[in-house]
Image (cartoon, rainbow, N blue to C red):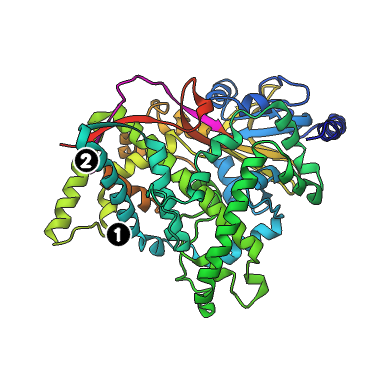
Amino acid sequence: MSLYVPAAFLAVGALLFVFRLLNRGGIKHIRGPPSPSFILGHDAVIARQEVGTLDIQWMKEYGPTWRVRGAFGTDVLMSADPKAIQHVFQKSAEEDVPEFHALASSRSWHRGRRHDHQRQRKIMSPAFSVPQLRSFLPLFQRIAAKLSNKWKGELVATGELSLLLEKWLSRATLDVIGEAAFDYNYHALDDGERNEISKAYANIFADASYMPSTASLLFRAAWDYIPTPVLKLTRYIPLNPYTRMRKLNNMFREYGKQILREQGPEVDTEKVNSKDAMSILSEGLTLAFLAFTGTVELTRDFPVKANRSADSKTRLDDEELIAEMFTLTLGGHETTSTTLTFLLYELARYPEYQERMRQEIRGVRAKVAQRGETEFSTEDPESLTLTNNAIKETLRFHPIVISLARVALKDDVIPLTYPIVSTTGETIREIPVKAGQVFSASFIGYQRLTEAWGEDANEWNPDRFLRSEISKQPANVSVFANLVLEMQAFLAELVETFQYYPPKAKVDIQQAMAGIFSFPAIRGKVDQGSALPIGISLAQ
């Protein structure tokens, strides 16, 4: 990248900084930590923290809502308050995703404006069907069994095995998303046939966003103020992560075109808008997204069907379609596999709970056998109380999405569940904000609130969901929903069959941060990417 490019962005940043100094106001009465940088604000320290460290520290000092400084002097309202988060993400229709997050989702470098995003979501909304998701249970169970058989094969010779859990689960969930979303087999679990795209997706979040440089943070902070045609040129920057994402994007475009050629002729255009079309894995995908942005899990070929609608207003063009397919694959497997990885890691740390889960699964399996069947029906996973509580608790304690930002498009008033104290000592129960105010929801902060989750909020304890008071939280923003069938299917197979325990070689696992996402990593070796070693053996 030419030296003139960073210099130009620094000049733009300086002008923006002066502009903001002359137009400050709005939320300056909200307390928060002093800014460590004249230009970057808190952006660098937030981007390089271990997940939740600063949020929890600031919550203790300032309460569940506080102010930080963004790049170029931007005041950002951060909150872990459930009512504030619910208002911004569920009740207010006048909030929009800042352009940084639109680009960070890697939507094929297509910078969709707000009306484009709304149109795309409206096209897909009729297909958001939980019953259709449940029709994928046989697929989930088949791929979970395939993974299980591979591990069994490894254990035949040794009796015990140390493996990198995240790598295996990522490959398995990639196969799920390929078949469920596009009826396409990535062969991610088939070493001999494993295609190039399954290799290209490996470790993508960590490689693309972990420990960004100061220049990169400044560059990204300027994106909101750069004209779209100029911004699109960022794809050609000959540096990572742009090179990595460009190669992956180009590779997927070829696969996307191939899938469209194979699936397109079979589309029934009369059923495009039918509510019994397959549900879609919308951008971001995983239950943490579902809780706070309304996105949903899995689909088969609805994106292709949407592309064949006769009405241009209810049709995705090929660029949008391939971009959606790219996003579904990018977000749809890594996020699910990471949640499963953290869950099995916690079971290794808490063997008593692991054994309780195993016995519960075997009890339900016995009932299935009594019916003369071999596989779970869609109703069976609902009776796995301990398993479902473990999923809830892992989504709470190890959220994949750490935070999301929104910018107010008009003046608004954000209500609070938990009052805070202003810089002048005033008790604040609601916060008026002006158009243009940036709001950042701290999901990791909310999910560690002792007021919401109890005094043991900083511990992994699935039994908390057996407490009646947890369901009585004010303005509950639960991270759990009815769309956990994929995880239930994998856990039923993998916990029933295998015993999990910490590896013999002691390692310190941390939840590292890459952009707004988190991933498991070995402390001191985070540069090696997502990794979580664990010991397994056949369960007795």
Element class at badge 2: helix
Q: Quadrant of the C terminus?
A: top left
Residue 244 is a magenta residue: no
219 shown above or below 123: above
Q: Amino acid at mark 1?
A: Thr
Name the residue that disc number 1 marks: 378
Across and down, in percent, residue 316 comes to: 63, 66
Q: Nearer the viewer, residue 127 or 318?
A: 318
Q: Residue at x 71, y 52 (%)?
A: 111
Give whichever of discs 1 and 2 has the lower sequence position.
2
Q: Which mark is residue 439?
A: none
Across and down, in percent, residue 348 comes to: 30, 30
Q: Which residues are magenta?
A: 496-513
Q: Quadrant of the N terminus?
A: top right
Q: Residue furthest left?
A: 370
Across and down, in percent, residue 531 comes to: 44, 31
Element class at badge 1: loop
User: For mark 2, does the 10 Å Cα neighbourhood hold few (<14), some (14 to 19), or many (20 or more) residues?
Assistant: many
Distance Cα–Cα, label 1 vs label 2: 19 Å
Is residue 214 at least partly visible in the picture? Answer: yes
User: For mark 1, does the 10 Å Cα neighbourhood hold few (<14), some (14 to 19), or many (20 or more) residues?
Assistant: some
Q: Are marks 1 and 2 in contact (CB under 8 Å)?
A: no
Q: Residue at x 75, y 49 (%)?
A: 232
Residue 500 is a magenta residue: yes
Name the residue that disc number 2 marks: 358
